[in-house]
Structures are given as structure tokens and as C-alpha cells.
Amino acid sequence: MAGKPNGGSFSHPGPLSHAIHHKIGAITPSFLPGHGIAILPADFLLLVFFLILWLQYRHRVKRRRKAWQLLCHLIARHQYTLVQRQQTCLTEDHYGIVDQKRWQKELDYFCQSILLTCLMQENLAEFWPSLRQRTLQRIKRVVKILLKQSQTPPHLPPTNTVEGNTIRRFSANMNPLDYERFCASLLRQAGWQARSTPPGADQGTDIIAEQGGIRLVVQCKLYSRPVGNKAVQEIFTARQHRHAHYAAVVSNAGYTRPARQLAHATGVHLLHHSQLSTLSITDLQPQPDLFQS
């Protein structure tokens, strides 16, 4: 008979002990396919948890990238309008003072009415706070580049002209006739055969440009304030008088709301002179609205 340690006797395992051993035996580790790494149930749940976190992070990164691409597209789409509005807002008043707050208000309006609205339509508005400063910096950089290009047109080809000296650089101090010559030289850079009309007999047309059988009539406005709808009315009439295919008003400043509304109704193009050096016939054709449902 076996000894009894400490004066006691050995106890036989009871039902509870059998249940515990059975429970422990049931927990068997699983193995990753092709590996000898054992994964216990708790490790598996942790792995699933981190996998879900990674997928959520990846999805958020993709959506944030989509939001930034949309913002860049909208800035590019309205880049020339932004240039016009900056020049208008930062124009000196009668006392020679430039009010920077006007341009800041214009930027806020553009961000709220255009950028944020489109982000909300795409359910991407949550990324606007983190992208706002980056967006403002991009707008500033784009406007600066366009202004530099408009003031120093690159590689302007030599032209034979009877109009006098070709104006190659924009200056706020130039007179209206010099501005017309400047715009005509930019059109010739884009491949147009452009000539200025004689002063006093233009019938509302300052420049007649032709390319590939397409005729474009242009009225130039060197203004320190937004151009009104009178210029739109005059060039619209001139298009019919000159039997032209397209008509445009070109200015160093912006355009009033009535002018933009009338231009939309009559098909007149409202341009900034920085657009002329790359203006093609395709640019004058109606463009589809990418955000129209």
C-alpha cells in the first residue's frame, strides 16, 4: 500500500479535474499555411484586429488622395479666373493703397463656394481642414506662375508686322494701343495670324486673328477695374459684322457678374491676356461640364 505523505492519503481525481484537463486539451494551436508558426486563438484575433486597422487606414489614404486630386483639378479649372480676381482685388485705390483683405475674402469665397462644395458632393469634406493650408499654398503658386508667364512671354517668335514694334512684356503703364499690340503678339505666339485694326474704324474689334480657316475677333480692355457687359455687347456685334466664328474680350482685370452672364448667353469668351500665348481653336470650342450629373 502506498505511503501517505504528511499523514494524509492520495486523493483520486474528481469530475472537476477531468473537465479542466479536457478544456485545456481542446485548445490546440493552429499553424499558418506553409509556416511552422503557431497561432493561438488570442493571437489570431489580434491579427484580424490589426488587419482591419490597416485596411481602414489604406482606404482613408486613398480617399484623402482623391480629395487632393479633386482640389488640384478645380484650381486648374479656375486658374485664370483666380488670376483675374487677384489682380482686381489687389488693385491700388485712389490713395495708392492695396487692401489685402479683399483678396483674402475672395479666396475664402472660392474655397467655400467651389472647393468645399465639390468635396461635399463627393463625400470628401472631412479632409478639407487638413488640406486647406496646402490648397491655399497651391493657389498662390499657380497664380504666381501664370502672372510671371503673362509678364514675360517665353520664346516669342519674330514676326513681320506693319504695326510698329511688337510689345513683348506686359506693363500696367502701357497705353491701350500698346496693350492691343501686346495681345496680338501673344496670339501670334500661339500660331494665329493676328493683326490689329486701325484706330477709330474697328467697329468694336481691336484684333482679327485667323488660324486654319477659323476667324476670331478680339476686343482688348486695359482696365484697373472689372470689365462690364458693354464690351461683351460690342464684340458680339463685331463677330456678326466681321463674319467671325468666335469672339473674345481680353483684359488684364476681371469681369463683372453681368458681363459673365451675358458672355455665357452670347458665346463670347472672357479671357485674361495670359491665356493668349497658348490659345487654340479647341479652347474656343464649348467644353463639357465634368461635374454635371
Image (cartoon, grey):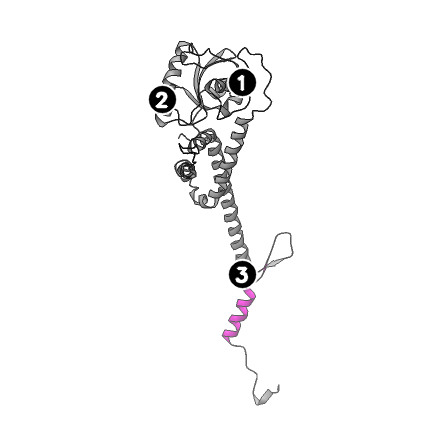
- Residue 261, compared with residue 212, is above or below; it is below
* Left or right of 210 on screen, residue 233: left
Q: Quadrant of residue 6?
A: bottom right
Instruction: Check contact, mark 2 vs mark 1: CB within 8 A.
Output: no
**Where does the N terminus fall, quadrant-wise?**
bottom right
In front of the other: label 2 or label 3? 2
In front of the other: label 1 or label 3? 1
Disc 2 element: helix
Residue at 51 percent of width and 38 percent of height: 138
Residue at 52 percent of width and 57 percent of height: 45
The residue where tag 2 is placed is 229
The residue where tag 3 is placed is 42
Residue 69 visible within the image: no
The residue where tag 1 is placed is 185
- Residue 68, compared with residue 190, is above or below; it is below
Residue at 51 percent of width and 44 percent of height: 61
- Amino acid type of the residue tagged 3 in the rendering: Ala
Compare marks 1 and 3 and give the one earlier in the sequence. 3
Q: Residues within 10 Å of mark 2 (few under 14, many from 20)?
A: some
Q: Nearer the viewer, residue 291 or 33?
A: 291
Q: Residues within 10 Å of mark 3 (few under 14, many from 20)?
A: few
Residue 5 location in percent, x, y? 60, 87
Cα separation between marks 1 and 3: 75 Å
Cα separation between marks 2 and 1: 26 Å
Magenta span contains residue 19: yes
Residue 68 visible within the image: yes
- Amino acid type of the residue tagged 1 in the rendering: Ser
Q: Give the residues drawn in magenta, as a range.
A: 14-33
Magenta span contains residue 287: no
Judged from this view, the residue extending furthest toward the bottom is 7
